[in-house]
Image (tube, grey):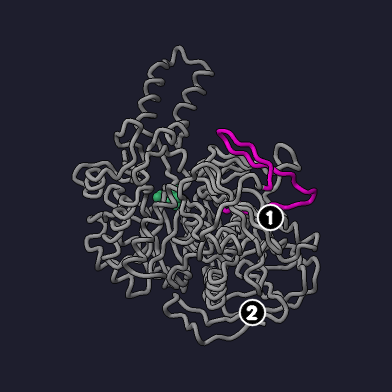
Amino acid sequence: MIRKYTFGLPIDTNAVIAEIKSEDILSFPLELKTGERLQISFDLLSDEMIFGLGEAIRGINKRGWTYESWCSDETNHTEDKKALYGSHNFIVVGDRFALFVDFAGKVEWDLGYDKPDRAVITLDGNDADVYIIYGKNQRDMVVQFRKIIGKSYIPPRWAFGYQQSCWGYATQEDFYTVRDRHRENKLPLDAIYMDIDYMDSFKDFTVNSERFPDFQAFVDSMKRENIHLVPIIDAGVKREKGYSVYDEGHEKGYFCTDKDGKEFECGVWPGIVGLPDFLNSDARRWFGSKYEALLRCGIDGFWNDMNEPALFYSKRGLEKAVAKLKQITPDTMDIGGFFEMRNVLFGMQNSYDDYCSIYHNLDGKRVCHKDVHNIYGAFMTRAASEYFEEKYGKEKILMFSRASYIGTHRYSGIWFGDNFSWWSHILLNLKLLPSASMCGYLYCGADIGGFNNNVTRDLLLRWLALGVFTPLMRNHRALGTRAQEAYNFENVEDFSDVLAVRYRLLPYLYSAFRKASDTDDMLFRPLAFDYPDDKIAREVEDQLMLSDECMIAPVYEQNKSGRNVYLPEPMTLYLLSGERITEEPLEKGLHYIEVALNEVPLFVRNGKKIPLAKPAMNTAELDWENISFLG
Ligand code: GLC
C-alpha cells in the first residue's frame, strides 16, 4: 500500500512514473513541521534498523549517522562524509514503513544521530511529494517502491564481461597494448574505456585526430576482436568559439545562466565550460543527439561523468579568490591568514555559493540550481538514454552515470566514483550493493582495484573476487597511480583463474539480473531481509544475499588467508578457480573458511542449482547454452 502526500508545488523530478492520487496532508502519519523547510520526524523503535539511501557511505544499516542528499563530486569516501555522487531519498524503517522523499534540493537525514531513538529528515524547501509505503516485509516494500519508479535499465549483454579502464590511456597504441596483453596472458576482456584523453582538448564528442588518425578503423578493428570501446562524456562543454557543440548550444540558449541571464562560466577539465541546461527538454534532446558523432563510428557504450555537476571553480569564485589573495603579503600574513588563504583556494571547488548562483530554464520556468541540484546529472543521463532508445532501441547501448537521482535506474547504471586502493573500500563496495539495488540500480559497481592510490596484487585479486558478482565489473584507476591491469602482476594465472569464474557464472548472473529487473526486485540483499528473526544474521555487514540462490562473502582484509562467515541456514560452499571447483556442505552457524588468492567463494542454498558455462575470453565467444550445474 502506497500513500502519496503533496506539499506545495513540487517540480517534476521524473522519479515516479505511476499515477498516484495525493492524500489529504492532514492525514500524514508522521510528525511534520512546515514552514520554509519541511521537516519529517519519527521515533525509532529500540532495535529498529534503517536501510536505504542508495549510494551513501557507512553501513548497510544506516541508523546512527547523519547523511545528506546532495550529489557531490566527493573524492574521499571516508566515514566522516555525508554525501557521495547520487541522491537517493529512499529508506526502509524496520518492517514498519518505507519512505521516499521526492525533492530535488538538499535533504538532511538525521537517522538517530542527534538523538539515538529519533529520525529527523529536513528538506531545504517545502515543495515535495512524500510517499509512505507499507508492506509485508522490507523486501515487499522495496518491490512496491520499485513498481512506481519503473523498470531497471538493462545494458547489452557484453557489458557483463570484464572491462579494463585507466585514466591515462591516450593513444590508439595504448588501447591495442591493453587488448593484446590481456590476450597474451589469457585474461578475458570485453571492453576498454576511453577516459578524457581521447578527446581533443577535453571537448565532448570530439576525438583527438593525432592520437586516433582513423578513429572509425580503430573502433572496427577492436570490434572484430570483440572489444567494445567505451568513451567518457563530461557534463561541461568547453567554451570555445568555433567548437560546434559550444556554438550551437550558445546560439540556442541551451546553457545554464547566472542570475542576470549570462552564461554561467566554470572551470572543469577543458578549462572554462558552459553547463548544458539538462532541465530544459529542448536542450536535453539537443545534447542527446550529440552522442551520434561517436555512435556513428560504432561506439556502443558511454559513461557520463562530472555531472553532479563538478565545478573546480567558477569564474566568479575565481575573481573573488584572486581579489582576496591580492590582499595577502608574505610580511603581513599570520597563521590565521595562512588558513584563510587555504580555505579561499579549496573552498572554490564545488562551492555551495556557486550552486546557488546558477539558473535553469525548466521549460519556461526559471529555477535556481540549488533547488534542482540533485536531478542535474540524472537529466544528463536521461538526455543520452532517451536518444539511444529512440534511435537504437532497448538494450543496445551501455550507459552508466556518476551522478544520479531516483529514476535514473530506468536510463542507466551507476558506478560508485573515485574510491581508493584501500582494503576498507572493498567492504564499502559490498555495502553499497544492496542499497543501490533497493533504488533499482542493478547495473552498478565500483572501480575494482581502487581509483586513487596504489594497488597491490593481493588487493586486486580479492577485489576481483567480489567484482565477479557485480554486474559492472570494471578495473579503473587514476592517472599517475600504479599500473593496475592484471597482466602487470606476478603469476598472472591467478588473475585468469578469478576472471574465468566471472565468465563461467555469467549465464547465472545475467539471468539473476534480468529476473531482478523483470520483477522489480533486489539483486543483492542484506541478510537482515531474508532472516529477520536471526539475531546474528540481522547484523551481518560483510556478506550479502545474491538473488534467491546464493550468498557471497568475499575476503576483504590484508594478509588474510580466509575469513569468518555466518551461515543463517545450511549451504554448500563452492570455491571456484578457473575450471577447478571444490565443494563443502556447511551447517548453519559460524565457520572459518580458507580462500586462496585465486579462488572465489560462493555459498549456495540447499536445493538450488547454479548454471555454469565453460570459461571464455569474452561474452561473444561464451557458449551460453552449453551449461553444467553447481549443486
Ligand atoms: C573523474 C571520474 C574518474 C575519471 C576522471 C578523469 O574523477 O570519476 O572516473 O577517471 O574524472 O576523467
Q: Secondary structure at mark 2?
A: strand
| In the image: residue 395, left or right of residue 149 | left
Q: Can residue 270 be seen here?
A: yes
- Which residue is at 31% across, 38% downward? 272
| Quadrant that contains the N terminus | bottom right
| N-terminal-most mark, 1 or 2 | 1
- Which residue is at 48% across, 27% downward? 342
**Above or below, comparing residue 553 to residue 98 in the picture:** below
Q: Report the mark closest to the observer, 1 or 2.
A: 1
Percent x, y of residue 428:
61, 53
Q: Can residue 494 be seen here?
A: no
- Give the amino acid type for the residue marked by disc 1 in the picture: Phe
Q: Which residue is mark 1?
A: 97
Percent x, y of residue 138:
68, 61
Q: Secondary structure at mark 1?
A: strand
Q: Pointer 2: residues within 10 angstroms few (<14), some, or many (20+)? A: some
Q: Nearer the viewer, residue 395 or 468?
A: 395
Q: Which residue is mark 2?
A: 581
Is 44 inside the magenta-drawn segment?
Answer: yes
Q: Nearer the viewer, residue 557 or 8?
A: 8
| In the image: residue 446, left or right of residue 540 | left
The quadrant where residue 174 appears: bottom left
What span is colored magenta in the figure? Answer: 29-54
- Which residue is at 36% across, 70% downward? 393
Percent x, y of residue 140:
66, 64
**Above or below, comparing residue 371 to residue 421 in the picture:** above
- Give the amino acid type for the residue marked by disc 2 in the picture: Ile
**Above or below, comparing residue 88 to residue 216 in the picture:** above
Which residue reaches farthest top? 332
| Quadrant that contains the C terminus | bottom right
